[in-house]
Amino acid sequence: GNSVTQMEGPVTLSEEAFLTINCTYTATGYPSLFWYVQYPGEGLQLLLKATKADDKGSNKGFEATYRKETTSFHLEKGSVQVSDSAVYFCALFYTGGFKTIFGAGTRLFVKA
Amino acid sequence: KAGVTQTPRYLIKTRGQQVTLSCSPISGHRSVSWYQQTPGQGLQFLFEYFSETQRNKGNFPGRFSGRQFSNSRSEMNVSTLELGDSALYLCASNLEGSLTGELFFGEGSRLTVL
């Protein structure tokens, strides 16, 4: 079946460090891929998305490229800030499935 | 444009009771999904509604039910509460149902079962 696997956290970084959070997926067909972020006490919000192979989603300095050959959608940011501390969820959606499947989430702590 | 609104935000119940949670989607959104979030299980899909029809359901017991009204507002109900039902229940809406996939989440209803 369809599934999403992302690296376990927590991930602790110093401010201005480089961030990578790995995400791989298993899916039939051609799903859309997403990264959502959840700040403390809030619901999830969309960070970025890619709808087909080789698409790059980007937002707020974060990037992820849809790699069909490696079934991956790794999240990267060149220089993290304390305000990036949150839980990050990788997710996939496929038309007709009527549901989004989420990874387990990766908690990021950024120290000043 | 108002976001997704969930009520109540917090509630405490005891085992055996039932609870009803409400979700008002973004105006114009006709698809509503529900998720259960717990530290151990992450985000688990409960069900999805579009134009008052349930189109998909997750692997939860029959104690978990939902419905959607003609104005797209949705409710979910959990009967005979168990301790393990303590969780954050998240509602999300989507503009075109199954086409874009992008979800807009509410802040959740945090249920504590004692």
Image (tube, rainbow, N blue to C red):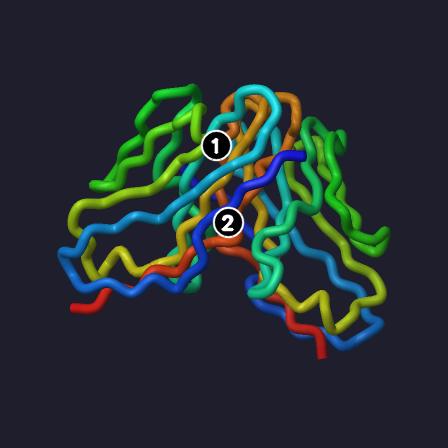
Query: Residue A25 versus residue B15: which sits nearer the camera?
Result: A25
Q: Which mark is residue A28?
A: none
Residue B85: % across, % down = 71, 65
* Residue ID for mark 2: B106
On screen, residue B109 above or below A88: below
Element at label 2: loop
Residue B36: % across, % down = 63, 55
* Residue ID for mark 1: B102
Query: Residue B32 versus residue A51: which sits nearer the camera?
Result: A51
For the residues marked 1 and 2, what is the alpha-carbon distance in whole angstroms?
Answer: 13 Å
Q: In this image, A32 relative to B91: left or right?
A: left
Q: Which amino acid does the dot numbered 1 rest on?
A: Glu
| Residue occupying the point 34% across, 62% down | A11
Residue B24: name its quadrant. top right
Residue B107: % across, % down = 49, 55
Question: Label 2 marks which chain's residue?
Answer: B
Residue B33: name its quadrant. top right
